[in-house]
Structures are given as C-alpha cells and as structure tokens.
Image: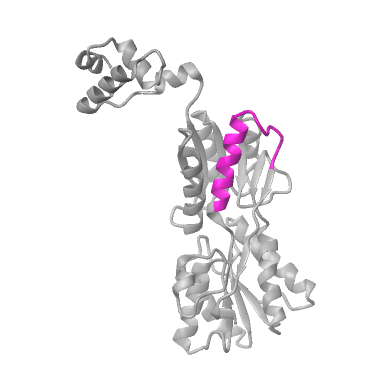
Amino acid sequence: MADVARVAGVSPMTVSRAFKRDASVSEATRSAILRAAEDLGYVFDATASNLRSQRTDFVAVTIPSLNNANFAETVSGLSEGLKDRGLQILLGYTNYDIHEEERLIEQLLRRRPEAIVVTGGRHTDRARRMLENAGIPVIETWDLPPHPIGHVVGFSNAAAVRGMVDHFVARGLTRIAFIGGDADRDTRGTDRRAGFIAAMQSHGLDATRLIAAGIPPISMREGADAMGRLLDTLPDTQAVIAVSDLSAFGALTECQRRGVDVPGRLSIAGFGDYEIGAICVPPLSTINPHPRDIGARTAALILQVLAGDGTQTSVIEVQPELTIRQSSL
C-alpha cells in the first residue's frame, strides 16, 4: 500500500479509502491510485478490513462430487447469483461421505463464512450440532429433509422417481427394475430407490428387481455391469430406471453390445438430464432436477437473509421435470 501511495503521490490511508470506494476520495485520485496498483501488480489485502467489519464475503458450500454435471450446474447458478454482491464461494468436496462432510463443515465454519450451503439433508449428529449453532444462514439443498436445520432449497428424490414409474406403467410395462441407490453413502440415490419401491408397490407390482451398482458416484461402466447382471438374471424385464443418466447410459451401451433393442425390447430411463443423455442414440428419458435453478434460488435466499429479510425458515421446493425421449417411447 505504501508503494502504491508513493507512485500515486498520495498517503497510504487515501489508498485504503480508494479501494473501499470511500466518497471522500475523488474519482480522479481513485483512478490514479488504481493505475498505480495495476502497474505494480498490487492486490488489496482485505484481511484486516474483514477483521474490522466482521465480514468475510464468502459463502461455504459442500458438494459430494466435483465431476458431476448436476452439482457443477448448482454451484454455477449459486456463484452467478452471488457475484454481483461481491460474495465468493469456498467449495468443500465430501465424496459422498458424511464423515468427510463433518470434517469440512468444521473447517469451513472456522473461517466464519457469511452462510453455508450443504448438499442433502442427512448429516452426522456432530455436523448437525455445528450447523445448528453456526450463527449464520444454513441452507440444505437437493433434498427435502423432514427436520430442516435452517433453510431448504430442494425436492423429494423419492417423489421424483414416481413420475417415471407411472410413465412406464401407463405404457403397460409392469416388470420394471431399478439400478443403483444401494449404497448408504449416496442418500439421494437411496431415496430414489426407496421411491421406486414405494411407487411399484402402490401399483401392486413386484418391487424386487433391484440391481446393485456399487459405491457412488456410479460410473457408466458400473451401469453397464449392472445391466449385464440384470439381463443375465431377469431377462424378462421390460423397463429399467437407473439412479443417474451416467449409469443409464452405461446400461444402454450394454444393451447395444448384446443386441437388445431399446426401446423395442427394453425401455431405459435415468436421472439428471445430463448432456450425454440427450445426444446418445436413442436419447435417454430422464428426470430433470433443474440443478442451476437450485443454485440460483439458493443465492437469492442467501442475499435475502443477509439483508435482514426472511429470517423465518424457508423451504423452497424445486419441481423436477419428467423428460421423455426415445429410450422409453
């Protein structure tokens, strides 16, 4: 700061005021200071300012996967909604492990974020206590937990799958299988599996065609392997719902390898509305959870709460959309 002040011909205090957009600094002086800072490669250190103001200007976010397009879209929508207010995102990666989430929540809260956003509504007891006592807005996303910690922006994963079951049943398909959702680490996948079972039972149909796919995140290869086991053990299956579009794509390719006609012989649907599902042949039927909208609505809620409006707990339900394509026609 002293170097910038010397080059610009002002005091270090004037440099500080210029970076804080203080009205006492004229635009001409501010422009000279910014040119000097640019020439010197100077970046304003906000740490001391944050200590005085008790603001850190970042929002902590935990997501289970870094390479999942849905979660990337949510983070993108969240970031876009926050950037105009000068809020940045500090991201934590849990790898579908609630104990890792607990560790990250502690680390993130030590940095005193303005708010914290967590994916899902299931946490360890200790993580829940930390969030309940954080003293900042807490938003649970991608779920509708029965006992929210604070605010919620999400949907029922179980209810979302019911629409796809109903679609297949309306087409006269009754021997329907589900791939994935067998691991406790992916609570949203587990909920989708439970939703499949409940929907099948409500139609009076057999809900036991459940094919394990492994530890999340479920890959295309694991989806293909699961479909292979399904075709070997339950060859009369008429339709398959996979826990994600990636596993559904793997299942589709296994059918193609074996010469199984999709959708003539077997219908396939996924979850997530990934790009690959829209461009593969045939395109995959899926459930679009509107991940960017989840992020955008979470950002709007954070700004509302930080502005002092909306201190009551908010539960914002995003409605997933059934997208029917050629794989299930």
Question: In the rendered view of the protein, which quadrant contains the C terminus?
Answer: bottom right
Q: Is residue 227 left or right of residue 66?
A: right
Question: In the rendered view of the protein, which quadrant contains the N terminus?
Answer: top left
Residue 199 visible, this orientation:
yes
Between residue 89 and residue 322, name the one nearer to us: 322
Spot occupied by residue 109 in the image (x, y as percentages of width and height): 53, 32
Q: Residue at x 63, y 28 (%)?
A: 308
Q: Is residue 86 left or right of residue 323?
A: left
Label total for image: 0
Q: Is residue 223 above or below residue 71?
A: below
Q: Is residue 282 left or right of residue 194?
A: left
The stretch drawn in magenta includes residue 316: no
Q: Residue at x 74, y 70 (%)?
A: 199
Q: Residue at x 43, y 56 (%)?
A: 67
Q: Residue at x 46, y 42 (%)?
A: 91
Please give the range of residues in magenta: 293-314
Q: Quadrant of residue 183?
A: bottom right
Spot occupied by residue 120 in the image (x, y as percentages of width and height): 61, 49
Residue 208 visible, this orientation:
no
The stretch drawn in magenta includes residue 302: yes
Spot occupied by residue 20 in the image (x, y as percentages of width and height): 40, 20
Secondary structure of the magenta portion, mostly? helix
